[in-house]
């Protein structure tokens, strides 16, 4: 009989066995990346093509085009699309990021044949009806009004402008007037020039059959595409001011400390992620112990690496009482300097290794995670060996390794401090 008074034996993740994609290239050049995983009759289908922030001729165009792409086609109204998707218990939407627009479908495999014609029509024949677009614009402006009351949003917005420059594609925050300048015709032109023209890549994950692939080839393989060139974002032109304060009356302040760091391609990536985890990436991290448990300044504080484009960001964030804002900033910088000055104790490093290896393994728990794990690296030009490299680095990192990478990236040089709220 199991003795529940005895803790189970400790085991560290030694390797991660990934379900890898298989790529099929159609005669017209379209690539279909198949991830056959799971026993449930579930399919996730994503169509990626260029059409992101770096391609848009004016603010909000890429975001509005992706968000409104399901609001009407040459043959279906927004209501008809919504009713059809609901009838089959599916999910269908569009989204955009720095470089790409993607259209997503989640459905049961048995319904894929019925939904694919509509999915294809939405991808290549949207109409962006004026009445539906007006609703989207109003929603954006209303959400913007709400967000401007939140110090967390104000801080994040100011942070992006400080890091990249307020006119950089990644640093400019859309304003209400931008929505007024989005029209049906401008979205049609943008979609036609980018997504509808570019050679797409399709990711299909779940219980994939030969029939599903045949259907994709029947629709996407018969179309002629004219690939558009990659567009590189301009180099960041960060603010010369290292402290940015967005005043807003209240009892609390939101703090962000951030700097540009290398992206996932850089050899320091894995060790920098480990150092950041030790600093503020898990509940027992140094910032949590100091700022939350010892000082009682906050309920939570975190540090993380965001590296989904050609640039990476190190971001530390928390919310504190206005009266301890400067004290909290001082303690954050103190903890960063401690990691520069002193190697991590061996036991602390072992804890960080366990946390990160476990988190990495659990990030591939289901078909959604596995699909995301592929797209996250593929569209940055990385392969599955990226994850193997993380595992090896996490397992073999030494205190000296962590201290060395902290010395490169945890200094206050080029470190922006953003405060939104009442700064006392």
Image (tube, grey):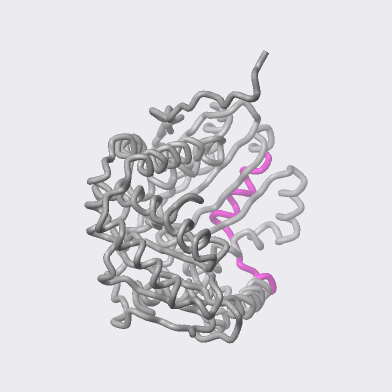
In percent of width and height, residue 409 lies at 27, 60
Q: Is residue 227 left or right of residue 218?
A: left
Residue drawn at x 71%, y 49% is: 85
| Residue 366 or residue 104, whichever sits in front | 366
Q: In the rendered image of this protein, does residue 263 appear above or below residue 164?
A: above
Q: Is residue 52 magenta?
A: no
* Viewer can see residue 41: yes
In percent of width and height, residue 172 lies at 42, 76
Most common secondary structure along the magenta stretch: helix
In percent of width and height, residue 40 lies at 65, 29
Q: Is residue 368 left or right of residue 275?
A: right
Q: Is residue 118 magenta?
A: yes
Res. 24 image quadrant: top left
Q: Which residues are magenta?
A: 114-132
| Residue 37 or residue 299, whichever sits in front | 299
Residue drawn at x 40%, y 81% is: 244
């Amino acid at each position: 009989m199991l003795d529940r008074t005895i803790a189970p034996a400790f085991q560290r993740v030694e390797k991660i066995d990934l379900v890898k994609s298989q790529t099929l290239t159609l005669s017209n050049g379209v690539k279909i990346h198949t991830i056959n995983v799971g026993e449930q009759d579930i399919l996730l289908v994503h169509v990626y093509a260029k059409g992101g922030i770096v391609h848009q001729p004016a603010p909000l165009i890429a975001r509005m085009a992706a968000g409104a792409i399901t609001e009407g086609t040459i043959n279906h109204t927004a209501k008809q699309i919504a009713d059809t998707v609901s009838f089959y218990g599916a999910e269908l939407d569009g989204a955009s990021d720095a470089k790409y627009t993607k259209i997503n479908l989640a459905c049961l495999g048995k319904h894929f044949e019925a939904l694919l014609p509509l999915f294809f029509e939405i991808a290549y024949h949207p109409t962006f009806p004026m009445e539906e677009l007006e609703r989207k614009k109003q929603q954006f402006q209303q959400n913007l009004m709400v967000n401007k009351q939140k110090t967390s949003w104000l801080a994040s917005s100011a942070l992006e402008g400080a890091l990249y420059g307020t006119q950089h594609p990644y640093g400019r925050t859309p304003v209400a007037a931008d929505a007024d300048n989005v029209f049906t015709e401008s979205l049609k032109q943008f979609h036609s020039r980018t997504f509808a023209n570019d050679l797409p890549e399709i990711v299909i994950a779940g219980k994939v059959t030969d029939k599903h692939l045949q259907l994709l080839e029947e629709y996407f393989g018969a179309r002629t595409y004219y690939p558009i060139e990659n567009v590189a974002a301009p180099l960041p032109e960060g603010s010369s001011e290292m402290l940015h304060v967005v005043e807003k009356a209240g009892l609390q302040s939101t703090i962000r400390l951030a700097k540009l760091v290398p992206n996932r391609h850089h050899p320091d990536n894995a060790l920098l992620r480990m150092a950041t985890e030790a600093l503020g990436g898990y509940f027992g991290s140094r910032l949590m112990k100091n700022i939350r448990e010892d000082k009682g300044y906050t309920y939570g504080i975190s540090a993380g690496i965001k590296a989904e484009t050609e640039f990476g960001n190190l971001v530390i964030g928390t919310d504190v009482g206005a009266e301890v804002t400067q004290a909290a900033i001082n303690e954050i910088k103190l903890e960063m300097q401690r990691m520069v000055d002193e190697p991590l104790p061996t036991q602390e490093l072992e804890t960080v290794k366990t946390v990160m290896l476990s988190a990495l393994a659990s990030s591939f728990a289901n078909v959604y995670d596995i699909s995301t794990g592929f797209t996250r690296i593929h569209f940055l030009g990385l392969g599955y060996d990226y994850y193997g490299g993380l595992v090896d680095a996490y397992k073999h990192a030494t205190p000296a390794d962590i201290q060395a990478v902290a010395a490169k990236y945890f200094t206050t040089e080029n470190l922006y401090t953003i405060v939104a709220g009442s700064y006392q």
